[in-house]
Image: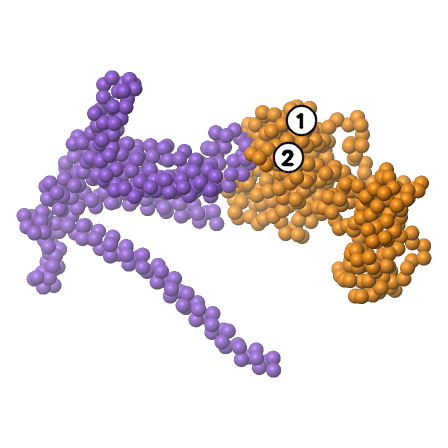
Chain colours: A orange, B purple
Amino acid sequence: MKSLGSIRRDFAPWNDPNAKPYIQFENVTKKFGDFTAVNNLSLTIFEREFFALLGASGCGKSTLLRMLAGFEEPTAGRILLDGQDLRGIPPYRRPVNMMFQSYALFPHMTVEKNIAFGLKQEGMPAPDIEKRVAEMLKLVKLEQFAKRKPHQLSGGQRQRVALARSVAKRPKVLLLDEPLGALDKKLREETQFELMDLQQNLGLTFVVVTHDQEEAMTMADRIAIIDKGEVMQVATPAEVYEAPTSRFVAHFVGNVNMFEGKVAERAANTTRITGATGAQIVVENSTDSKAGSDIVFAIRPEKIKVTSKKPADAVNALEGEVYDVAYLGDMTVYHIRLDDGQMIRASALNAARVTEDPLTWNDRAWVSFRPDAGVVLTR
Amino acid sequence: MSNIAITDSGPSTAAKPLLTRLGAGFVSRLVIIVPYLWLLFFFFIPFIIVFKISLSQSAIAMPPYTPVLDFTDGISGFFAGFRDLNFDNYVWLTQDALYFKAYVTSVIIAAVSTILTLLVGFPIAYGMARAPATIRPTLLMLVILPFWTSFLIRVYAWIGILKPEGLLNQLLLSLHVINQPLIILNTYTAIFIGIVYSYLPFMVLPLYSSLEKMDYSLIEAAKDLGCPPTAAFWKITFPLSLPGVIAGCLLVFIPAVGEFVIPDLLGGSQTLMIGKTLWNEFFANRDWPVSSAVAVILLLLLIVPIMLFQQAQARAQEQDK
């Protein structure tokens, strides 16, 4: 069975036409004065899903989260949670909790008081609160820090307190605004997996806002890529990477090479494209583009093979010169300037310790790829 | 080569931090010494002089008290003067109920005015702290603006507003809210109005500075965790603004206890406050020793609670670390 990416997904309610959506954004628009932060956006999130809103800063992703939390009301459209319209419900009556980017820990309260805050508001009896707080402290491994105040903790510990506080009330949905933004790289990677485990164990729905594509790819079941207040694509990480539907998404997630050209000839399974400079490539059919129309072939660097001689069996092989080489340990990145002037980025996994075909600066080189190694984009 | 270079640079790099450390220590000590010298010369020494006068007896002389400690009779004469010092004036303060009443009234008036100033000042400071960052400097300027006019003139202006035929009564009469002029001037109400008006900036500024520092996302976090806005105010905003509340209250309460101008101009002759009593002793009775004793007691009355409070605060901070 052919599948995008390397993961087989058993949890995929978005492919099930009978699955009941949990969170629905229906034609939501949010304006701040003249500025449109969110523009007629519709989105569906399912129960127990780990959903990421990915986009550059100012794209409207945080506004979406804040509307879900109740800090902002949509200018138009509606947001449903479990079938209930959230309009007019203040944040303190919504069954969602948020983990703030700044953590927003109460500086005058100890760690345990911070975690107990939401439970006290709920009117939970004191012994139950105590039990739940102990449970939360254990969950985030901060038992011995219960009596400390936030300013006595490290960044990573604060992040855990914020997390414990936001899940203590067992919300239906947990909203996370750049949850790992303030952590250093190593801690961030560790915490990504902890968050995923936590989401699995508690069986909650997570909606996370991030500008870090790697973070979104690692953690999320599905990613919504947002640009200028609009959804560009909603798909699994593998689909977003391997089958982007637009140039924006292809560029935004990972590195990509773009071949611009016109459809020269359309056969049963393949399309021949003529580049601006006359180079011809053959790609797998994926659109109904007519002959003569403008088209873009997007291909990821690791799907391109670099060799010193023209591969005998290659359908697509283009000649050029090695412009730059970067050895990164696990892989080597080549920048090849094709003879028609286009720069190609290709990466090769260093699966063996020695290579029989070493390339260096200014060597002649061939780049080759399969017709199905990339995607054809029209927008 | 490289070895020589290292050994060469050795002594100088070791000596340098020591020198800079000494230099920095000297400069930082100098920085601390200046305010302490200031306090010594312009607070502590005058206070000792006042304290000495409070232990003297009044006399029809120049200066109007005995003994005068000076060196006209030599050093022995200077020390001989000490034998004539006693606490009679302090005993006198306890015998006349007037002083006790004046102290108590002053503290009550100052306390009530402080609470009123807090009630008026908090919403102003909160509004300023939540205003768009671009207009905050303007708002701050407006709070400080009254200081550019003489305090005395501003208090006089209140006479014009509050007197029976004044602006306030004319306005209320013309609007038919009242049909008899309100008697506000020369009452305690007028004193409260005067103190709240005059000391408002001292309350607003420290409140503003502590509220402005507060991260608004804390309020959002409280709401998110199920806390309605009013509860969020009492559980988050107010506790976090407490340093500002305390600073503002002290800045209003302390000068208000000894306030003289406002009760004298707005409070009329019946109101009893320690500042006025002090003034009367000094200028009407020309009894410097008794008025000095009044001043010393006033100082102790204010300084003891402040010191206790500061100690408690220091201890709380110590615990936090």
Location of residue A195 in the rendering, given as x and y in whole percent from the top left corner: 68, 42
Kind of residue indicated by mark 2? Val
Image quarter where the C terminus of chain A lies is: top right
Residue B143, quarter of the rendered image: top left
Query: Does residue A179 appear left or right of residue A303 in this picture?
Result: left
Query: Does residue B86 appear left or right of residue A89 in this picture?
Result: left
Cα–Cα gap, marks 1 and 2: 16 Å
Location of residue B40 in the rendering, given as x and y in whole percent from the top left corner: 26, 56
Image quarter where the N terminus of chain A lies is: top right
Secondary element at image label 2: strand
Location of residue A249 in the rendering, given as x and y in whole percent from the top left corner: 74, 43
Residue sitting at x 7%, y 48%: B59
The answer to whether residue A171 shows anywhere in this view is no
What subunit carries mark 2? A
Location of residue B251 in the rendering, given as x and y in whole percent from the top left corner: 32, 42
Residue sitting at x 86%, y 47%: A273
Residue B250, quarter of the rendered image: top left
Q: Residues within 10 Å of mark 1 (few under 14, many from 20)?
A: some
Labels 1 and 2: the sequence-earlier one: 2
Q: Which mark is residue A80?
A: 1
Q: Which residue is mark 2?
A: A38
